[in-house]
Image: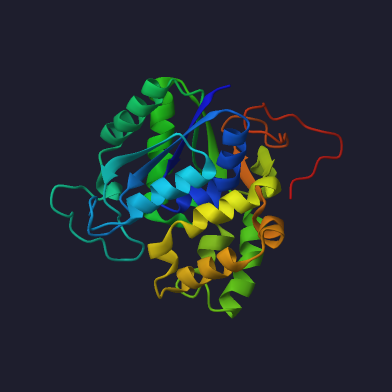
Amino acid sequence: MTTVVAFHAHPDDEVLLTGGTLARLAAEGHRVVIVVACSGNVKGATGAGNPRLEELAASASALGAARVVHLGYADSGHGPVLFPDPAGMVRFVRADLDEAAARLAGVIREERAGLLLSYDPHGGYGHRDHVKVHEVGARAAELTGTRVLEATAPRELAAWAFGPMRVLRLAVRYDPREFRLGFSPRSSITHRMDVRKHAARKRAALAAHRSHWSSGGRSARLARVMIAMPAPVFGLLFGREWFVEPGVTATAVSHHILQPAVAGPGERLS
């Protein structure tokens, strides 16, 4: 048994990138701690004015996580404009790297965590807060000597999925290059998790983020479609999660993040 700290940018990211893995780890008896950098609100609200953190707690409960921590930063937003810092808070992208890493390292040390989950260098599709998660996570791992795995997705799969999403007008605000050049090449992925058995928990965790999926945005429309899916269909589409372990041979693969990557005969990532 070990403690796993999953570091994410915003509330709901814990579901989309690692929800099935966290549910699987918790079901296996490991302690799961979710840390988010941002409040989930560009205004920086952290109290009653921002339900996102309350919804994060409900999501964490659905996944079986034991603890949730907010590092105290405000969202930076996704787009050309970076708004001024809200009163009493710093937007995450402006945060001092060593200060933010020290906050995360404090949680890692307190929990005596054996593994840190972070993001790939692209932050997935390039969101500036996600890229900052990678930078802060990498630095915190250096400070604590903790093994780190970076949550990602096969770049080829992301680029393929972007086409249908664009046709359905679910991804019109995203630059296609973010999907063609983001995430990680299939050949660099070291760990692939089959989490189909935990699809119902992952879907329930996504549903907990009510203020997000009930809004009028197109990403909210996609979330509503996902939540409405029967668990077997949800599991078929979203029942695999991927990680890259820095420094590990790119041709190796493991089917559990607590195990080292080992190449199997005829192994092929998907």
Residue found 59% across the figure and 28% down from its top: 29
Return the x and y of residue 201 as percentages of the image width and height.
Answer: 58, 49
Return the x and y of residue 73 as percentages of the image width and height.
Answer: 27, 46
**Any part of residue 31 in sight:** yes
Image-quadrant location for residue 235 = bottom right
Residue found 36% across the figure and 62% down from its top: 78
For the residue pair 245 and 46, the one nearer the viewer reads as 46
Image-quadrant location for residue 21 = top right
The colour scheme applied to this rendered structure is rainbow
Return the x and y of residue 237 as percentages of the image width and height.
Answer: 68, 59
Residue found 59% across the figure and 72% down from its top: 165
**Any part of residue 174 in sight:** no
Residue found 67% across the figure and 33% down from its top: 256
Q: Quadrant of the N terminus?
A: top right
Q: Is residue 83 left or right of residue 24?
A: left
Figure check: 189 above or below 91: above
Return the x and y of residue 72 as percentages of the image width and height.
Answer: 26, 42
Figure check: 215 above or below 98: below
User: How many labels were placed on the picture?
Assistant: 0
Q: Residue furthest left?
A: 87
Figure check: 110 above or below 70: above
Q: Is residue 50 left or right of residue 110?
A: left
